[in-house]
């Protein structure tokens, strides 16, 4: 997305093209506050679990309502995160073009936007889906803001490990939306996302290590050497792959899912071990090319959860 003007309400006066452009910039700025790319990742995990919970295609209305209010819930947390982190966002290359850091929207407007979305998503889940999904949504927002953003992010290198719990919640929300209860299967998928998050995030943080250091955010790559970080990436990658395989006996998936989980897991582990080997061989900094692992881990999660979606449809067809 092209950067919007520094003042969304700027432009020509009156109702001419300048005014229309400024309204468009204003809308784009608020959309950017929601972090759409992060929301896409959350939806990748929400949709498949609804298929597993329904043992096929979930009820259209429930699925649509869950996606709409889940998007609002995630957008709320992201906007409130932008409000709280507006000081450090200005210090980092990766975040300095966010709307609050660029003064495209005011801090007060960001806060109100986030709170309105939180209230709307909670009410929507409670009225259109069920109370359990509403409660889980509220927990995710509160955990992301108070535990991750305010408590952990600026204090400990374990910030993304435990803070990542908020990003795992869409799995539980999607299951609860369909079944109105929780079970072991969604908790297995919860753990897949939980173990996947640290190595995925640390690979990105290694690329932007100087940014986090300048903002005084103690991400693991800031406070530890490459070998330590990559060793932990290997360990968490193994935990991710082993947990993904556990879904086969727990949820009674077909061999199709198991085969996909094993193949994708093998690719993820090969890349993780390759990075660690390169580090031990003396390669460091940008030469490690950690962004390759970052992009691979994105593809891994998307394809794994695609298999989660397809599996109950395949099981129904085979039956």
Image (cartoon, rainbow, N blue to C red):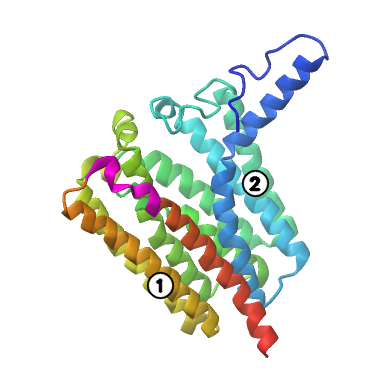
Relative side of 56 to 90, left or right: right
Q: Is residue 35 visible?
A: yes
Regarding mark 2 in the picture, which secondary structure is present there?
helix
Q: Point out residue 204 in the picture as x, y percentages from the top left corner.
A: 38, 45
Q: Please identify the quarter of the rendering in which residue 113 is found.
A: top right
Residue stretch rendered in magenta on the structure: 284-293
The verdict on residue 290 being magenta is yes
| Mark 2 surroundings within 10 Å by alpha-carbon count, few (fewer than 14), some (14 through 19), many (20 or more) | many
Q: Which residue is drawn at 72% across and 26% down?
A: 24
Question: Marks 2 and 1: in contact by CB < 8 Å?
Answer: no
Q: Please identify the quarter of the rendering in which residue 161 is found.
A: bottom left
Q: Point out residue 76 in the picture as x, y percentages from the top left corner.
A: 59, 42
Q: Name the residue under label 2.
A: 72
Q: Please identify the quarter of the rendering in which residue 136 is found.
A: bottom right
Residue 115 against residue 199 in the figure, above or below? above
Principal secondary structure, stretch drawn in magenta: helix
Which tag, 1 or 2, sits closer to the chain's start?
2
Q: Residue at x 34, y 32 (%)?
A: 211
Relative side of 292 to 119, left or right: left
In the picture, the disc for residue 135 is: none
The alpha-carbon separation of the residues under discs 1 and 2 comes to 29 Å
- Residue at the farthest top position: 13
Question: Which quadrant: the C terminus?
Answer: bottom right
Residue 307 against residue 277 in the figure, above or below? below
Camera-nearest residue between 291 and 176:
291
Q: Point out residue 201 in the picture as x, y percentages from the top left corner.
A: 39, 49
| Mark 1 surroundings within 10 Å by alpha-carbon count, few (fewer than 14), some (14 through 19), many (20 or more) | some
Question: Which quadrant: the N terminus?
Answer: top right
Q: Mark 1 points at which residue?
A: 243
Residue 18 against residue 36 in the figure, above or below? above
The verdict on residue 16 being magenta is no
């Amino acid at each position: 997305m092209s950067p919007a003007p520094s003042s969304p309400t700027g432009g020509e006066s009156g109702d001419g093209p300048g005014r229309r452009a400024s309204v468009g910039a204003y809308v784009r700025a608020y959309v950017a506050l929601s972090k759409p790319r992060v929301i896409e990742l959350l939806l990748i995990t929400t949709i498949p679990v609804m298929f597993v919970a329904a043992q096929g295609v979930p009820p259209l209305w429930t699925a649509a309502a869950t996606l709409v209010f889940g998007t609002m819930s995630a957008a709320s947390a992201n906007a409130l995160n932008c409000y709280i982190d507006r000081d450090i966002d200005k210090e980092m290359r990766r975040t300095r073009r966010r709307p609050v850091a660029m003064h495209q929207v005011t801090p007060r407007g960001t806060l109100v936007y986030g709170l309105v979305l939180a209230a709307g998503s909670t009410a929507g889940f409670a009225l259109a889906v069920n109370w359990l999904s509403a409660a889980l949504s509220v927990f995710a927002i509160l955990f992301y803001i108070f535990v991750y953003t305010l408590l952990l992010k600026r204090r400990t290198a374990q910030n993304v490990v435990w803070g990542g719990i908020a990003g795992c919640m869409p799995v539980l929300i999607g299951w609860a939306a369909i079944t109105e209860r929780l079970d072991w299967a969604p908790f297995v998928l919860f753990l897949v996302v939980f173990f996947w998050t640290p190595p995925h995030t640390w690979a990105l943080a290694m690329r932007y290590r100087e940014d986090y250091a300048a903002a005084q955010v103690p991400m693991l790559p800031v406070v530890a050497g490459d070998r330590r970080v990559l060793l932990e990436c290997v360990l968490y990658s193994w935990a991710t792959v082993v947990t993904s395989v556990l879904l086969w006996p727990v949820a009674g998936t077909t061999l199709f899912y198991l085969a996909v989980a094993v193949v994708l897991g093998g690719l993820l582990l090969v890349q993780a071990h390759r990075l660690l080997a390169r580090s031990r061989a003396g390669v460091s900094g940008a030469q490690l090319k950690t962004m390759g692992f970052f992009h691979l881990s994105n593809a891994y999660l998307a394809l794994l959860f695609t298999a989660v979606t397809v599996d109950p449809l395949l099981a129904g067809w085979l039956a």
